[in-house]
């Protein structure tokens, strides 16, 4: 845990479409960078929109947060958290071409 902070978990499934095989590596890199940015930072709001934006920037033609995604047992939407809390989660990418 992060210096005794309270862990809030998330499970994100991002469904995306892309054009071209090379884009997939960039999308995986965007996922890794998001996890590095989101996870284990005290007080950082949960922001799945940032991941969707990064996937678009990586070359996806469409990207959406799946309805089965969750944050702290609730809906996976932007959420402010306390300064003593941090996020840690899993991300599943589904290429729906």
Image (cartoon, rainbow, N blue to C red):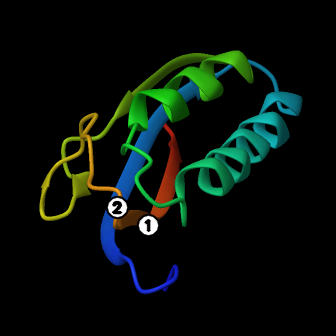
Q: Which mark is residue 89?
A: 1
Q: Identify the residue at horizontal 36%, vertical 45% (top origin).
A: 46
Residue labelled with disc 2: 11
Q: Is residue 97 visible?
A: no
Q: Which mark is residue 16?
A: none
Q: Quadrant of residue 84?
A: bottom left
Q: Is residue 1 visible?
A: yes
Q: Identify the residue at horizontal 40%, vertical 37% (top origin).
A: 47
Taking depth in this image into account, of 95 and 45 the one nearest to the observer is 45
What distance separates the C-alpha of mark 1 from that of mark 2?
A: 6 Å
The crowd level at tag 1 (other Cα within 10 Å; few <14, some 14-19, many 20+) is some
Viewport quadrant of the C terminus: top right
The x and y percentages for residue 76 are 24, 44
Secondary structure under the numbered disc 2 in the rendered image: strand
The x and y percentages for residue 17 are 56, 25
Q: Residue furthest top?
A: 61
Q: Identify the residue at horizontal 34%, vertical 75% (top origin).
A: 7
In the displayed structure, 18 sits above or below 9; it is: above
The x and y percentages for residue 39 are 54, 61
In the displayed structure, 20 sits above or below 9; it is: above
């Amino acid at each position: 845990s992060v210096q005794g902070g309270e862990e809030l978990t998330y499970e994100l499934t991002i469904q995306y479409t892309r054009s071209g095989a090379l884009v997939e590596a960039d999308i995986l890199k965007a996922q890794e960078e998001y996890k590095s940015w989101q996870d284990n930072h005290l007080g950082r709001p949960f922001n799945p929109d940032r991941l969707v934006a990064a996937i678009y920037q990586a070359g996806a033609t469409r990207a959406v947060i799946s309805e089965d995604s969750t944050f702290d047992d609730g809906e996976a939407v932007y959420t402010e958290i306390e300064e003593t809390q941090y996020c840690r989660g899993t991300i599943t990418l589904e290429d729906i071409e």
